Amino acid sequence: MPLSIRVSGTAEMNAPVSLTLQTSATSSGFRDAIGLLWRDKLATLSAILLLIVLVCVLLGPWLLADKARAVNLMARNAPPFSIDKGWMFFLGADALGRSLLARIIVASQNTMVIATSAVCLSLVLGGLFGLIAGYKGGWVSALLLRLADAIMSFPSMLLAVIVLFVFDPGITNVIFVLAISRIPIFLRTVRAEVLEIKERMFVTAARAMGARTDRILLRHIAPMVLPTVINLAALEIAFVMLVESGLSFLGIGIQPPEVTWGLMVADGRNYLGSAWWLAFWPGVAIMLVTMALNLLSNWLRVVTDPVERWRLQTTVSRHD
């Protein structure tokens, strides 16, 4: 009886200590990541830019939807820095006198929602198929790989053009076709990772202890693959943004009255000789966000790789 009381008391005392250690390790890891981000100035600027875009996505349509739709023929094709017409015309106005700044902020929501949704959908489906193909092998892996090869035989832009030409262009159809076209990228990447991870000792031990296949895949293997998938997703968001912009430029992507950055570039192509700013500023927005995603993805690759992270911390400590 005294022994059971003593063990119970020890367990109760160890529980808060374990929780404290886990919380301390998490906060320490977060501080280290912020420190590494601050040392990489390009990644820091990229993160700040993406935070600004996130604020525009969340608040822009709510605050500036009316200004983005307001027609003012007196300000038709107003040049940039037209402060006399109001600060909303800092970037100029389009052919209907609508503020370019307001339209770019409002269009950020559709642009980012389409790119993020398509990548998340392809990540989930491609990641799940990749886990199954890498772990099962055999005819299951061969079948999934042949399916990926069939999708990859069509360039993403061409596949999107064919599908959207047959079906009505719209946000849902654009997200669906872009997600389908990017599934093979995640499938092949995850499969290659799983082929190496499933031979490690902890997976063999879990299998020997009778763990179910779904538990091994989701609890043991998937967390090991997640850093690589996150890095790839950041790059894929930038690529999908460019593809969506190209589809809107061709007129088979998002249709008015909805607006995206690619659609704004398409609307401004007829005025390149007289009002270059109509296509220039949305193009700059696409370029900056794409570059920021690529730079941040490179930083994420370093942070999520223990070897690269250790080398970077060692180099910084030597310089300090």
Image (cartoon, rainbow, N blue to C red):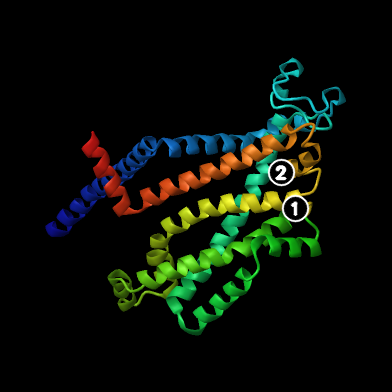
**Marked residue nearer the N-terminal end (1 or 2):** 1
| Left or right for 9, reference 190 | left
**Number of other residues with Cα within 10 Å of mark 1, as a class: few under 14, some 14 to 19, many 20 or more:** many
> Image point 65% across, 68% down: which residue?
154
Q: x, y percentage for residue 146?
A: 57, 78
Q: Which residue is mark 1?
A: 253
Residue 217 vertical position relative to residue 252 in the rendered view, above or below: below
Q: In the picture, residue 121 is in which quadrant?
A: bottom right
Q: Nearer the viewer, residue 214 or 274?
A: 274
In the picture as drawn, the residue positioned furthest to the right comes out as 73
Residue 126 vertical position relative to residue 5 in the rendered view, above or below: below
Residue 127 vertical position relative to residue 11 in the rendered view, above or below: below
| Left or right for 163, reference 291 | right
Q: In the picture, residue 259 is in which quadrant?
A: top right
Answer yes or no: do the residues labelled 1 and 2 have beta carbons within 8 Å?
yes
What amino acid is found at the position of numbered circle 2 in the picture? Thr
Q: x, y percentage for residue 51?
A: 53, 36
What amino acid is found at the position of numbered circle 1 in the picture? Gly
Residue 122 vertical position relative to residue 69 in the rendered view, above or below: below
Q: x, y percentage for residue 68?
A: 76, 32
> Image point 65% across, 62% down: which residue?
156
Label number found at residue 224? none
| Left or right for 80, reference 289 | right
Q: Which quadrant of the figure contains the C terminus?
A: top left
Q: Which residue is mark 2?
A: 260
Q: In the picture, residue 286 is in which quadrant?
A: top right
Query: Quick one: SS at disc 1?
Result: loop
In the picture as drawn, the residue positioned furthest to the left comes out as 2
In the picture as drawn, the residue positioned furthest to the top comes out as 84
Label 1 to label 2: alpha-carbon separation: 9 Å
